[in-house]
Amino acid sequence: MSEAHPIRVFIVDDSAVVRQVLGGLLGADRDIKVIGAAPDPLFALQRMQKDWPDVIVLDVEMPRMDGITFLQRIMQERPTPVVICSTLTEKGAETTMQALSAGAVSVVTKPKLGVRDFLLDNSSDLVTAVKSAAQARLGNLRRLPLPQPASVSPRPTVQVRSTPALRAMAETTERIVAIGTSTGGTQALEAVLTALPRVSPPIAIVQHMPEKFTAAFAQRLNGLCAIEVREARDGDRLLPGLALIAPGGKHLKVVRRGAQYYAEVLDGPLVNRHRPSVDVLFRSVADTAGRNAIGIIMTGMGNDGAHGLKRMRDAGAYTVAQDEASCVVFGMPKEALKLDAAAAVGGFAEIIETIRKA
């Protein structure tokens, strides 16, 4: 966005303090213009009819009409990128999962106490979330695929370059898959993981998501998938039929002990402004598994994971970038392609078939 065409944002939150703080933080960025705020969805609808925003920042727990109902109505009547502003509680996490499933693009958090200081300290996360949302292709969010295997319904757009990784994978049973994603990733991961059979290679995942929310996300996926999906714990063994998701606020690495792979969950500085970071996961897999790994980078804003995917490819791993046509935000795959980090480019069908063939 340029100064001439700022991102127009409307804030819906029942707290006057939150509305004031969010409005000030967002309005301070030259690429964002806050065009209004309302204490509940009904007031918001009245105001927005006169001047519809590019992005809505929405609390999900409000009087008169709850945020989920409002979000569903928006997505049906006038699809607009929505950033959920949710409390850091177990209930807030569960409600946020419903919101993401209903079409919200991403989530930022707020505590029940000390809201002003928390939001001020995390202002960059809020601004990044709004800018990511403004780039989102909502049509891709609303069309979760039910893909056929690529061998049955090939896509002519897939671009595959030669690599020894697939041949190497056929020579060993120690194979793992590493996936990194951000904005739009919750829906993308659901599309991929629900399509996998129970007998699938071990999967390690970094999805950019706040602390406390990854557990609810993993629990939701676990109820939908044939494979087991859960939040990674330090020391977990990577097993066939198991997908481990990095906990919010922690980095996830893969380490090898003898012939077996284990999860290492650890603190550490932000990497590419993220914790968990896709680069941290991918680099560990490159060093640990080499050509016995598959690296997949999917929808998201920024460049986290691009250098790590390149390191995986250089180590002999088979690497895939999600194509622009199916991404909600093409940023992360695009940055990986600039580095020649991906051996293949494809949509959901190609990604699913790559994992199945492992």
Image (cartoon, rainbow, N blue to C red):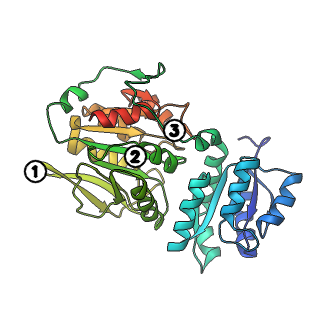
* Circle nearer the N terminus (1, 2): 2
Residue 145 disc label: 3
Three-letter amino acid code of the residue under disc 1: Gly
Quadrant housing residue 275: bottom left
Q: Position of residue 104 (x, y in %)?
A: 62, 53
* Alpha carbons under labels 1 and 2: distance apart: 28 Å
Q: Position of residue 18 (x, y in %)?
A: 70, 71
Three-letter amino acid code of the residue under disc 2: Leu
* Circle nearer the N terminus (2, 3): 3
Q: Secondary structure at mark 1?
A: loop
Three-letter amino acid code of the residue under disc 3: Pro
| Residue at the extreme right of the image, as rendered | 50
> Does residue 311 appear left or right of residue 224 in this picture?
left
Quadrant housing residue 84: bottom right
> Does residue 128 appear left or right of residue 283 in this picture?
right
Quadrant housing residue 4: top right
Query: Residue sitting at 32 percent across and 60 percent down?
Result: 232
Instruction: Kindly identify which residue carries mark 2.
Output: 193
Instruction: Kindly identify which residue carries mark 1.
Output: 258
* Alpha carbons under labels 2 and 3: distance apart: 12 Å
Q: Secondary structure at mark 2?
A: helix
* Circle nearer the N terminus (1, 3): 3
Query: Residue sitting at 82 percent across and 59 percent down?
Result: 45
Q: Position of residue 347 (x, y in %)?
A: 47, 32
In the rendered view, would you say 148 is above or below 240? above
Figure disc tally = 3
Mark 1 or 3, which is nearer the eye? Answer: 3
